[in-house]
Image (cartoon, grey):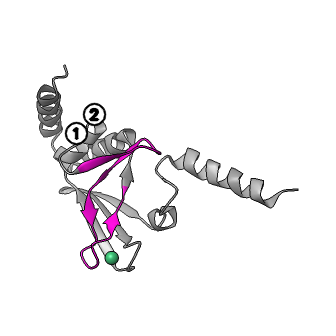
Amino acid sequence: MSRKKDFDDVQELRNGSLGVLGGEGSDFLEKVKTEVKPEGIVSTCPCGQCGRPQEITVEWPEAVVGSLKLLAPNWNFDEPSGNIYANVGCGSCNYQLKLLFSPNELKRHIMTAIQQGDVNPQDIARLVADTKQAAGLR
Ligand SMILES: [Zn+2]
């Protein structure tokens, strides 16, 4: 029997099934609460360093850019997980709050916002078209 192996299996399952956990800092990421609101995707989580609650809002233009597998200004690509994150620091201690999103996850949140009536589908369509044009996509 091997406890080490069991533990690895659990880690793989967690990363695989959720697709948003990076490894380092994943305990902190598990405490994230995400809500879809008119102003954007609002995530609340305790800072991984000082523990103070932080609120991060991904505004719809950023969410649209991310859902198209592109990086909005001030966003970075997290190579190990294949996800993207906004470059936001804790308001108290400046610790990097690495809140990972996958493009599909952002797309789902956008669809939820449209269904809830939080955003106008035409505004989203325009953002998609503008983003694609700016990136040279069609
Ligand atoms: Zn902090």
1 and 2 marks in contact (CB < 8 Å): yes
For the magenta stretch, what is the residue range?
75-99
Asked if the stretch drawn in magenta spans residue 56, the answer is no
Q: Nearer the viewer, residue 107 or 96?
A: 96
Q: Is residue 28 left or right of residue 12?
A: left
Residue depicted at x 69% and y 53%: 8
In percent of width and height, residue 52 lies at 34, 80
Numbered tag placed on residue 68 in the rendering = 2
62, above or below 25, in the image: above
- Identified by mark 2, the residue type is Leu
Q: Is mark 2 within 8 Å of ligand 1?
A: no
Element assignment for label 1? helix
Q: Nearer the viewer, residue 23 or 117?
A: 23
Element assignment for label 2? loop
Residue depicted at x 22% and y 39%: 65
Q: Is mark 1 within 8 Å of ligand 1?
A: no
In percent of width and height, residue 108 lies at 36, 42
In percent of width and height, residue 126 lies at 11, 33
* Quadrant of the frame with the C terminus: top left
In percent of width and height, residue 11 lies at 63, 54
Numbered tag placed on residue 65 in the rendering = 1
Residue depicted at x 36% and y 58%: 99
Residue depicted at x 42% and y 43%: 79
115, above or below 46, in the image: above
78, above or below 24, in the image: above
Asked if the stretch drawn in magenta spans residue 93, the answer is yes
Which quarter is ligand 1 in? bottom left
Q: From mark 1 to mark 2, how far is it between C-alphas?
A: 5 Å
